[in-house]
Amino acid sequence: MNKNQEFLLYNSGSRTKEVFKSLKPGKVGMYVCGITPYSDSHLGHGRCYVVFDTLRRFLTYLGYEVNYIQNITDIDDKIINKSLETGKTPAEISRKYFDLFMDSMEKLNVAPASNHPKVTGNIPEIIEFVEGLISKEFAYERGGSVYFRVSSLKGYGSLSGREDAQEENLASRVDLEDEKADSRDFAVWKKDEEHGWDSPWGKGRPGWHIECSAMSRKFLGDEFDIHGGGLDLIFPHHENEVAQSRALTGKEPARFWVHNGMVTLKGDKMSKSTGNFFLLNELLSKIEGPVLRFYLLSAGYRQLLDFTIEKVEGVKNSFLKLKELKKELENSDLEYDGEISTNNPAILALLDDLNTPRAIGEIFKLTLPVLEKIYSGSAEKDEMEAAWEMLRIVEEILGVDLKDTGHGEISDEDIENLISERNAHRKEKRFAEADAIREKLSLMGIIIKDTPSGTKWVWEKGIEDIDE
């Protein structure tokens, strides 16, 4: 790590902000729970992976080498049910929806993880983990399935802070409730003759929680720096991960537990189970990926984010201002390749628990006045360099791509010629002809602005009507 400032990161385990320090100098191991690809991803998934991509980018800026692991739950009750409905194999279903997910991630400028391990590719490690739990008497076999004995582990419920967690553990995704010794216990291996693998307990497949414990251990070790996911995973999923890992290794698996807040629609959590959600690929067909990413970062990552078109429209207008500024800076004679200052106010905001809304506020506090000064011809070199630095934070750390996405078959030269023609009409007071050219450019997705220093233009992809 080559930056000196302290990075404060909220730890769900301690329920406080802590100074982040990695276990190994200059290296970070980060595990984030991935998707179960049985259907299209929704906006809540988009927020989760934009948040952790931004965290990864910021850690990289701070000088860390980040080993980012994001699993794929490619065998699961929901995938099997989808297989029965469609006649396709579980592998075909998981491959289809994971590919769609990755396409959406690319549009959101979310880089692939260092590794995307699949459950089906790590069965030996999962079986070995289960065997270890049984040998230490933290788990037991019943009828070909294996269950974790919750009562055998002291401190169960410490992550979620729920003293009644043992009583409330509903053993999510477990079908054979009558086989368990205690209703609080949860499956680490499930009997399944049709879709299972050979094991010491007969054919079966992993329970939901065990896969993450086994794969985080395989790729990051018994202890690593950050475990992330949505707030809804704290209990029971992450609580049960902690229990399994602590039982087997005697160590806490992750030093920091980081959880992003939910996305809501009209005040209710987006969820496939309730039907209250927007599909990510549908939204990205109507909203530019950088605009949607900027919107997802417009609230603190731990806060609830209520989705409305009006809020996205507001973010889009701000995004266009930044694109406009970048275009003006690129057209200037200024060449800037300096480093991002560690004392930049946007960086200082991010050092406080990745405070993206405050960082965005600092960015606009500087860039908007500079844009106006550029238009009036009064911008100084140091002001323009400071604006460039802010745009680098937007693109490199926030991951919001400001590059021009193209204008179909029309070239920049053609756009400039049309603007010159329009201005000639205005000069000669032929305003109807001038307005017709403005409308023509608008239909192409190009907006123009008349300023004291001339007519400026920027490419805009409008947000199509979305039925909320």
Image: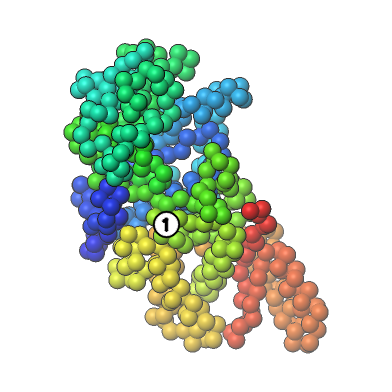
Compared with 163, 190 (above or below) is above
Give the x, y percent position of residue 340.
34, 67
* 276 relative to 9 in the view: left or right: right
- Picture quarter containing residue 155? top left
**Residue at screen point 39% across, 41% down:** 233
On the rendered image, what quadrant is the N terminus found in? Answer: bottom left
Between 458 and 354, the one lying in front of the other is 354
Give the x, y percent position of residue 100.
55, 40
Compared with 355, 127 (above or below) is above
The residue type indicated by label 1 comes to Gln
- Picture quarter containing residue 309? bottom right
* 451 relative to 194 in the view: left or right: right
How many marks on residues? 1
**Residue at screen point 29% across, 68% down:** 342
Q: Is residue 133 visible?
A: no
* 283 relative to 172 in the view: left or right: right
**Residue at screen point 54% across, 25% down:** 81
**Residue at screen point 24% across, 24% down:** 138
Q: Is residue 373 visible?
A: yes
Query: Which residue bears the numbered disc 1?
Result: 303
Give the x, y percent position of residue 269.
50, 48
